Amino acid sequence: RQLWACFAYATVSISLTMFNKAVFAVYEFRYPSTLTTAQILISLLFLLVWRTVGGGAKQRFDLKVVPKIFPMSFCWWIYVISGVTALRYLNVPMYSVFRRSTTMVVVIGEVALFKKRPSNRALFFLVTMCVGAIIAGATDLTYSLPGYIMVGICIVSTAGYLLLIRLTKDKLGLHETSLLFYNNLVSLPLMGLYLVGGTNELAGVLQYPRLYDRGFQLFFLISASQAFVLNLCIFYATTINSPLATSVTGQLKDILTTSLGLFIFGDVTLSKFNLLGLAVGLCGGIGYAVNGYQEKFRVEKGAILKQ
């Protein structure tokens, strides 16, 4: 179950990144907030249908839960909108190498919240990932300040979201699907207010020349639908493993994401040092993931031997 949860999260995450990038790069749809709103609405629709047919837990809606879940939902909203916006400005390899820094923030959070300290080897690989991101960013020939700012916000909010999933679930005792339902329900008005009051996207969408293109509609629908599946996978992987295990899985899936992003969209301009930074960050991520699973295996083996 633990391995399947990580595999499902990695697969859906790669697919969602590619479809999101295709919507922006191939179809030139420049409206990330609209895509995010569609993702929330479709997620709520799927959850309502799922509950109707008997999926998930039959927990009644409780208005008192809303303020308790708001910090997690707020982090998720910031994480989604900043991640989608960053992907509009950055190519996939650069987006991936910076996103790996999320693990460092998660580790800091786990030390503060759960008193869980990383080993020296884990710290070495974490530093390696960050060094790779610094080298890649300093030598990026497709430099984009808005993209860098948004991906930085995405890193912090993603880490907060992963940590708050664990804290909120343990505190409220909600089933994954109920927690996901509350999360989307609280995020929808935040997204709606931002879309109407903080952007001028609605007017742009109505004038978008490919709005009725069947190919665009298919890619948009798949992208919006996968957000629900990804969120469900994140909840499942984080609750049966840990926030760190979910973040480690993200390092491994970045191997394929980076490889695909180098060749599919044609928006990558590499220099020697930029490629070196990508490689260093990727090696740090792989090393960290392998070390994490080795440490977990040793702990579980030791527990079995004691029994």
Image: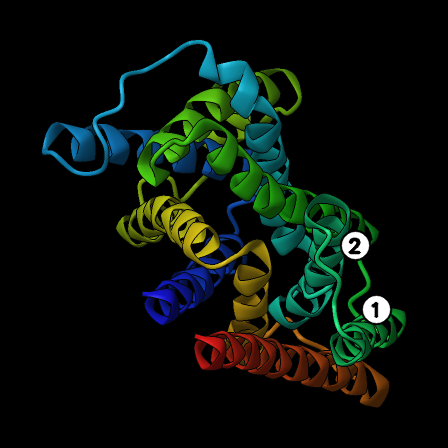
Q: Which mark is residue 148?
A: 2
Residue in the image at 42% along x and 9% along y: 63
Q: Position of residue 212 (x, y in %)?
A: 31, 40
Q: Amino acid at mark 1?
A: Gly
- Describe residue 152's horizontal placement relative to residue 31 as left or right: right
Which of the 4 quarters of the picture holds residue 142? bottom right
Q: Amino acid at mark 2?
A: Tyr
Quarter that holds the N terminus: bottom left
On the question of residue 260 being in view, the answer is no
Quarter that holds the C terminus: bottom left
- Describe residue 158's horizontal placement relative to residue 303 as left or right: right
Q: Position of residue 230 (x, y in %)?
A: 40, 52
Decide which of 246, 151 is in the foreground and name it: 246
Q: Which mark is residue 106?
A: none
Decide which of 281, 108 is in the foreground and name it: 108
Residue in the image at 42% along x and 22% along y: 185
Check contact, mark 2 vs mark 1: CB within 8 A.
Answer: yes
In the displayed structure, 103 sits above or below 262; it is above
In the displayed structure, 114 sits above or below 19; it is above
Q: Position of residue 66 (x, y in %)?
A: 49, 16
The disc, 2 or 1, on the residue closer to the chain's N-terminal end is 1
Q: Which mark is residue 137?
A: 1
Residue in the image at 81% along x and 79% along y: 124
Q: Residue furthest left?
A: 53
Real-space Cα separation, disc 2 to disc 1, in angstroms: 9 Å
